[in-house]
Image: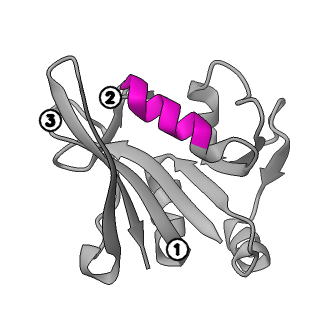
Amino acid sequence: MFSIIAAVGKNRELGKKGDLIFHLKDDMKFFRETTSGHKIVMGRKTWESLPSKLPNRTNIVVTSRDLEGPDEIVHDINEFITDNKDTDEEIFIIGGGKIYAEFLPVASKIYLTEVDAEDKEADTYFPEFDKTKFDRKVIKKGSQDDLTFDICLYQR
C-alpha cells in the first residue's frame, strides 16, 4: 500500500529553492514517528536536499542516475508501482512534487499537514487531487510561530 506524506500551504505549496517551506516541530515529529520502520520513496532532488540518509527507514530514490547512499535506487517508477501496489506493507512517498503526482493515483492514504499560510515564492507544489474521493480525518491541530495547521489523514 502506498501512502503519501507532506506538508502544504493554502495553495498546495511544498517547497522553494530545494527546501521545505514549513519547518514545524509537530509536523517533523509526526513524519518521523509515522515513517519510522518503513520504506520511504523520494525523487533525486528530495534525496539531495536531505542532510543524510533518514534513519530507521529504507531510503529508496527514484532516479535515472546512479547515486551513492540510498538503500535502493529505482530506475523505472512504473515497474516499482506494479511490483508494490498490492503489498500490505505501508510504503511512504515523501516527495517531491513530481513523485507525489506519479503516486497519487495509486495512494490509499495521504497524510497531509495543511498549514494556514501561503508562500508566493514557492517553486514546488503538491498535485491537485479530488478530496471528495477520500475520507478526511484531522489527526492533530497545532500552531507554531504564528502558523496554525491541521495534520490530516485522507483515506480512500
Is 31 within the magenta?
yes
Residue type highlighted by circle 2: Phe
Work out whether mark 2 precedes mark 3 in sequence or the reverse, and give the earlier one. Answer: 2
C-alpha gap between disc 2 and disc 3: 9 Å
Magenta residues, dominant SS class: helix
The residue sitting at 85% across, 41% down in the picture is 71
Q: Is residue 88 above or below residue 149?
A: below
- Say which residue label 3 marks: 117
Q: Is residue 131 above or below residue 110?
A: below
- Say which residue label 2 marks: 22
- Say which residue label 1 marks: 108
**What is the x, y in percent for residue 6?**
43, 47
Is 102 within the magenta?
no
Residue type highlighted by circle 3: Ala
Tell me the element at label 2: loop
C-alpha gap between disc 2 and disc 1: 24 Å
From the viewer's side, name the closer residue of 15 and 144: 144
Q: Which residues are magenta?
A: 24-33
Q: Is residue 47 above or below residue 130?
A: above
The residue sitting at 33% across, 75% down in the picture is 135
From the viewer's side, name the closer residue of 126 and 58: 58
**What is the x, y in percent for residue 7?**
36, 42
Residue 45 shows in this picture: no
Tell me the element at label 3: loop
Quadrant showing the C terminus: bottom left
The residue sitting at 75% across, 29% down in the picture is 55
Q: Are marks 2 and 1 in contact (CB under 8 Å)?
A: no
The residue sitting at 73% across, 50% down in the picture is 38
What is the crowding at mark 3: few (fewer than 14 residues within 10 Å), some, or many (at least 20)? some
Q: Are marks 2 and 3 in contact (CB under 8 Å)?
A: yes
Quadrant showing the N terminus: bottom right
